Amino acid sequence: MPLGRVSEVATDNESVRIAYTHGGDAEEAAGNLRLQLPIDDYSAIVAFFSSEYDARAIATAMAKHFPCTSVFGCTTAGELGPRGIGDGGMLAMAFRSRDFSVVASRIKDIDALQFDGVRDNIRQARTVLTELEDGALGRNRFGLLLVDGLCLHEEPLVSTIGACLDDIPVVGGSAGDGDAFGETWVVFDGEAHRNAAVLLLVSTELPCRPFKCNSFAPTSTKLVVTEADVEKRIVRELNAEPAAREYARIVGVLESDLNGHVFAAHPVIVRVGGDYYARSIQRVNDDGSLTFFCAIDEGLVLTAAGRLDTLGVVEQMFRDTEAELGEISVYIGFDCLHRRLDAEQRQIIRDMEDLYVRHKVVGFNTYGEQYESMHLNQTFSGVAVGKRKPQ
C-alpha cells in the first residue's frame, strides 16, 4: 500500500489508543490507522474524518481493516488530535475492552423522530450494557452522540435522548463538512448515513467527568426575532429590521463584510434558566436573512455577547477536571467551528492548539455540540477519562 501522502502519529493512552493520519484516499487512510493501532481486543473504534474523504468509502475501508471491531464516526469541520487542530485528516480512538463496555444504537430518520422508537432503542441498549457489566458495581457511564450536522433537528433528538437517559450524561457533536455546509455523514458499523445519529453508551471503571465551557458573556444589547422560518432556522427580521442589516449594525460592521469570522467573534446568546447559550449564525442568505446552527423562534430575545478570556477559561476547566479525576488519559472533545474561526481571527489558534495537545484532547470541530439534554453552539464540551488507579 502506498503511504507517501500519509503521515501518522500513534499514541498509546493506555485505555484509549489514538491513531492519526493525513491525506491519501479512504483505503490508504484506513490502512494506515490499522498499522498504527496494536492488535488488541477493542470494544469499539470511533473515527473522526475530514469531509474531503468519501464517507461511504471510509465506512467500507474501516470495516475491512478492523473486521473484529465495530467502527463508528462522522465527518468533521476540523480534526483535534495528537498533531493539534487540522484539516484533511482522520483520527481513530480505540477503546480497549479491558476498560470499556460499549453498546451502540443507530437513530435514523431524524426529521421524522418518534419518541417511542428512540425510547425502545435506548431501553434495549441499556439492557445489553447491564449484561456486559456483569454485576460489576461502581462503574461510570456516559453517552457519546454523533449526529448529522445539517439535519436541523438536533434539539428534539437531544431532548428525547435526555429524557430517556436522565441518569447517564450525554455529550456529543454535530458532524461537519469543513466550511462548505453541503453534506454531513455519520458512520455506523460499516455504513455511512445522513439524517441519522449514532449513540454510544459507554461503561467503565475509570473515572470520568463531562465538561462544558465557553468564552462569552452577556451585554445589555438585545435583538428580538420578529420574523423567522422556524423549520429552516432562518431569521428574516431582527428588531423589525432585515436580519443581516440589523445584526451588522449591532456588531459595528458593514453588511457586506459579514462572514464566518464575524459571526464567530460576535455571537448572539439566549438565556435558559440561569445560564446563557450561544445561537450561532451559519451564513447570510441572498435575501438578507440569516441561517442559524440552532433552533430559533419568533419572539425569541437574543443578547449580543461580549468575550471572555478564551484560553483562560479552557485552562481553568482542565485544572478543575484534573483536580477531581487526577491524571487524564484523554479528553474526548467537541469544539464548535466558530471557536476555531474566532481563534484564527485573533491569532491565538497556535496557543489553543498547544493547550489541546498538552492535555490530550481528541475530537473534532463541530456544527454544534450536545451536552446532556441541550444542543449548543460556540462551546467546547465532551468527557474527560481518567487513568486506572494503581493497585
Image (tube, grey):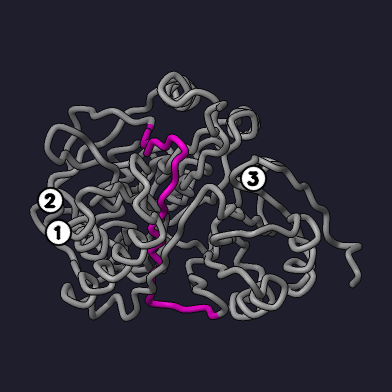
Instruction: Say which element carries label 3.
Output: strand
Q: CA distance from mark 3 to mark 2?
A: 37 Å
Q: Residue at x 29, y 33 (%)?
A: 305
Q: Position of residue 94 (x, y in %)?
A: 61, 55
**Residue that label 1 marks:** 297
Query: Left or right: 228 with respect to 257?
Result: left
Q: Which mark is residue 81?
A: 3
Q: Residue at x 23, y 80 (%)?
A: 112
Mark 3: give few (<14), some (14-19) or many (20+) Cα within 10 Å. Answer: many
Q: Residue at x 22, y 55 (%)?
A: 162
The residue lying toward the viewer, choosing from 389 and 141, is 389
Residue kind at label 1, given as amino acid type = Asp
Instruction: Say which element carries label 1.
Output: loop
Residue kind at label 3, given as amino acid type = Gly
Marks 2 and 1 close (CB-CB < 8 Å): yes
Q: Position of residue 10 (x, y in %)?
A: 76, 47
Place residue 381 in its image quadrant. top left
Residue kind at label 2, given as amino acid type = Leu
Q: Position of residue 345 (x, y in %)?
A: 55, 37
